[in-house]
Image (tube, rainbow, N blue to C red):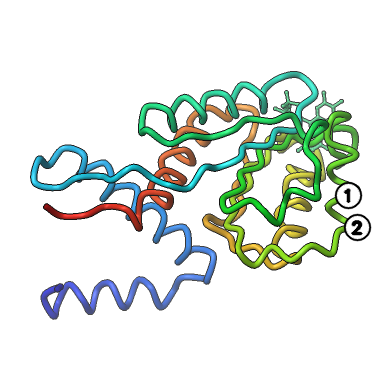
Amino acid sequence: MLAENKLEVLKDLVRQYSREEIIWTNGYLAGLLAQNETRESKETIVPVSVKPTIIYGTETGNSKKLATQLQTVFKKNKIQSKVIDAFQYPVEKLEKEDFLIVIMSTQGEGDPPQNAVKFFDNISNSSANLSKTRFAVLGLGDSSYPLFCKAGEVIDEQLARLGAQRALPFQKADVDFTPVAEKWFTEILGSLQQATIVKT
Ligand SMILES: Cc1cc2nc3c(=O)[nH]c(=O)nc-3n(C[C@H](O)[C@H](O)[C@H](O)COP(=O)(O)O)c2cc1C
């Protein structure tokens, strides 16, 4: 419970927030909580039963590298995940995913990378029901291009159109993508662990 004066400050702050900002703040706070709780001996993090699938779309390897780094973060936190090239991902499997993570760069003029063209088209033409799927998309790009991170943005919109629930708002990452990606990893971890922290 917050003291009255702190509650008023919080209410004032939240009043100025958009819906996306509230979702982001929720993930951010959950991430902070998860970090603190690993340090406290009276609380236990039970294994996360969700097995996220990480799909990457890449031309020059950045998105693949981040997908692998995220898998390492998951491993350290005892979360099993799969990393898969968008080219090899059968879109029919989407309905079976409970937590889908997409890391996708943008090429050409707002286009998906070559390995993700089929995935991109299939998802755009899909009528799957993804109401049981949570997801998060990280778009890699370069803000000097007019259509900054467009391919990632389209994937994010398509997943939402199919009824999937955003675990985090769409995140764009510019050429210096490492700090943005690392922060995003922490937020994903927070949103996965949120429901699984038990007090002993
Ligand atoms: C030929 C070319 C076209 C690009 N077009 C875009 C673009 O339209 N929008 C954008 O945000 N970034 C664009 N980028 C930047 C890439 O998305 C960025 O370098 C990204 O980190 C590459 O990630 P990847 O190695 O996973 O493909 C382009 C890069 C190249 C080389």
Q: Give the spatial CA distance, label 1 vs label 2.
A: 5 Å
Q: Given the image, on which type of amino acid does mark 1 rest?
A: Asn
Q: Quadrant of residue 158?
A: bottom right
How busy is the neighbourhood of tag 2: few (under 14 within 10 Å), some, or many (20 plus)?
Answer: few
Q: Given the image, on which type of amino acid does mark 2 rest?
A: Asn
Residue at point 44%, 33% (across, down) = 74
How busy is the neighbourhood of tag 1: few (under 14 within 10 Å), some, or many (20 plus)?
Answer: some
Q: Nearer the viewer, residue 110 or 97?
A: 97
- Picture coordinates of residue 25 (x, y %)? 40, 59
Residue contact at pointers 1 and 2, CB within 8 angstroms: yes
Q: Quadrant of residue 2?
A: bottom left
Q: Quadrant of residue 5?
A: bottom left
Tell whether 16 sits left or right of 167: left
Task: Give me the disc on residue 106.
Answer: none
Residue at point 83%, 32% (across, down) = 87
Residue at point 61%, 47% (across, down) = 100
Task: Give me the disc on residue 125.
Answer: 2
Q: Nearer the viewer, residue 196 or 35?
A: 196
Tell whether 86 sits left or right of 7: right
Q: Which residue is mark 1?
A: 122
Q: Check the picture and name the quadrant holding the N terminus.
A: bottom left
